[in-house]
Amino acid sequence: MFERLGDIAARFARRKLVRTLNTAFVRLIPFITIGSIAQAILNLPIPIIHNFLVRSFGGSLIDLAAILTDSTLTVITLAALASISLSYTVENSDVWEGEPNLFVPVFTAFSCFIILFVWQGPIISLTDIVGTNSIFKAILVSLLACKLLFLFIQLIRSVKQRLHLRSLSRGYDANPAVQSAFDHVLPVALTLVSFVVIRVIGLYVIDVANLDALYAKIAGYMREGSLIVVVLVMFFSQLLAFCGAHNFVLFNLLPSLNDTTASVSSVFSLRGYYLHFGIVGGSGTMFGLLIALAIVGRKWYWGRRFARASVFPVIFNINEPLLYGFPVFLNPFYVIPFILAPIISAVLSFLCFKSGWIPPITNMVNWTTPPLLSGYLATGSLRASVLQAVCILASVVLYYPFVRAHHIYELKQRSSRFADMQAAAEAALDGYGSPVTERIDAVGQIAREYAMLLKQSVRQNQLPFYLVFQPKTNRQGKVVGAEALLRWEDPEMGFISPLTAVELMNESGLATELGRWVIENAVRNLAEMRESHMSDLRVSINLDPRHLEEDPGFAEFVKKIRDTYVIIPGEVEFEITEHIAINANDEMRELFRAIRDMGFGLSIDDLGMGYSSLNYINDYGVRTVKIAMQLINNIQSDYKQREIVRSVVQLADHLNLEVVIEGVETEEQADILSSLGAQIFQGYYFSRPLNAADFQAYVSAHR
């Protein structure tokens, strides 16, 4: 059920428009959250606490909350204009020749907003122009302005190409930025003129007097207070809120208890009825969504974070963090519960008030008064608080399946992006791609998130890795050694490729920390096995070239490890790839010789993967070579592979080298390799990589 529901909503979530707006408002999360908390502090409905804050520190706390509110929520429309324009530009970057000019669309949207809503307009407050009440205007203006701008850019470019025209700024000495700026003069001008035309036509078509008459007529219908009217008011108010407009557009047409200029026919025509018994916890009955997020959030980090960050504002009916930050608005997963939950609450409340079970609203209550308390204060009856609790419970039940569906969808999306990140990281490690943490797309975002996690774990000396040991056995199954392998399991994403871990650590400047951690932990495990009477075991450790390049004290480090854990010569072997061995500089060669002189062995990994020179065997005193699994994957049917392996084994035998065949997965492969002279094997046919305890048990059973 949840997956089916998620698939339906996902079709809309993948649309470019929805993706653009969601990305835009995610960028605003810090400002929306800070502003909402500050606004809640300013409007605390409890007089004792509010008075305490006013008196504390000479009123500086209230002043600080006011400053934070004015600098965030009061001007949030301007931030929305910029963020939406940026998102739209990134989503449509193919319009630009070369790198997108992010400034032009942003400032064009600002200019268009001023033309349409500010220039020579009525004298209104700053909040009405750029506060949360105008976010819907910002959405419309940004999308339309960017759409027109990009349309004019493409149109003018097409005309120039057909007429073979060149820009006036073109020249051998022209700055490319200047050229681009001049190219945008005409598209920007046409966009601004278009908005001037829209404004003129709008003023001509819309008669303010008729508009006021329309508002009065709508207000008259709303004050009838019938069940149909209650449902319609809730439906349209929530539809407006879901699209980014403020639902107070409708609620403000209704009278409050202290409004002496308007007639109040029933409790259902009061603004307080809708505020306290319809949208419990803010537009969309957000209290229900908050609880549903908290329930599902036990396994959903993203939802859990938002639930925690939104608790304080939502308690006081301020829902901007969830509405615009989560976001809920224009989110196809929540359109049904967002509209339906307040309708259910309003209908339940209608029946309770109509039957007389709840007394009429007799007291004016601040809109920030928390649910349960607001019901009691408005009616003087605890039954009203019970009613609000039932409404919240109903909204939780309604929101829960949609939150679960959203969670499943986000998990799939994140898993897909994470898989792309791993593929990109492995390509970067092999030298076929750019650093993943420098990418500006979703892959780069996830890479930076995990890189930051790794940096933090290094600072806390708690790397999230562990080691496993893959046994090396002879044909009879006797264990002669093991290779230490890095593993990383994330609570959310599960198993993460060791190559991804290495690349992220390298890009974070932590290659030295990772390399030293692997070496010390592998040697410590070997020492513990020796104490358990498991002698004559050799552990091989892979050396990362980045670590060798960035760790000038590597030789001193391994010497300290040798002395600390009393390593017997030959017990520990360092594996280097054939590529590293061939391309090593003089300094690296000297390091390899120093390692050998300390009693550590050297092994060549991936032998035969594209190189032919074997001079490095003499240069470094290598005693072991590993034949790559790619050379044996078709050995059952490929005569050439068999002959290559036979030649390498015979050459190694003449040079007194040990040969390890890795990637042996079947008995048939083991038999063929044995017939070719191979003696030591490593692969799943004999054993998978094992943790330290299981490896010791395996050794005991196979010695």
Image (cartoon, helix red, strand yellow):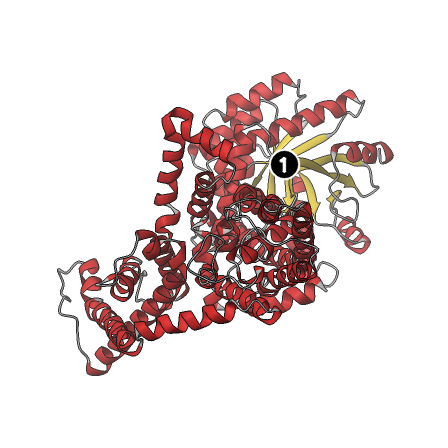
Q: Position of residue 361 (x, y in %)?
A: 58, 53
Q: Is residue 87 above or below residue 459?
A: below
Classed neighbour count for the residue bearing mark 1: other residues with Cα under 10 Å, few (<14), some (14–19), many (≥20): some
- Secondary structure at badge 1 equals strand
Question: Relative to the observer, which residue lies in front, 313 or 250?
Answer: 250
- At 60% from the left and 60% from the top, the residue drawn is 342
Residue 271 shown left or right of residue 570 in the figure: left
Residue 556 shown left or right of residue 208 in the figure: right
Residue 168 shown left or right of residue 650 in the figure: left
Q: Is residue 471 above or below residue 150?
A: above
- At 53% from the left and 58% from the top, the residue drawn is 328
Residue receiving disc 1: 465
- Residue 138 lies in quadrant: bottom left
Q: Position of residue 100 (x, y in %)?
A: 32, 61
Q: Position of residue 581 (x, y in %)?
A: 51, 40
Is any atom of residue 330 visible in this view?
A: no
Q: Is residue 404 above or below residue 14?
A: above
Q: Is residue 517 above or below residue 161?
A: above
Q: Given the image, on which type of amino acid does mark 1 rest?
A: Phe
Question: Relative to the observer, which residue lies in front, 367 or 509?
Answer: 367
Is any atom of residue 546 visible in this view?
A: yes
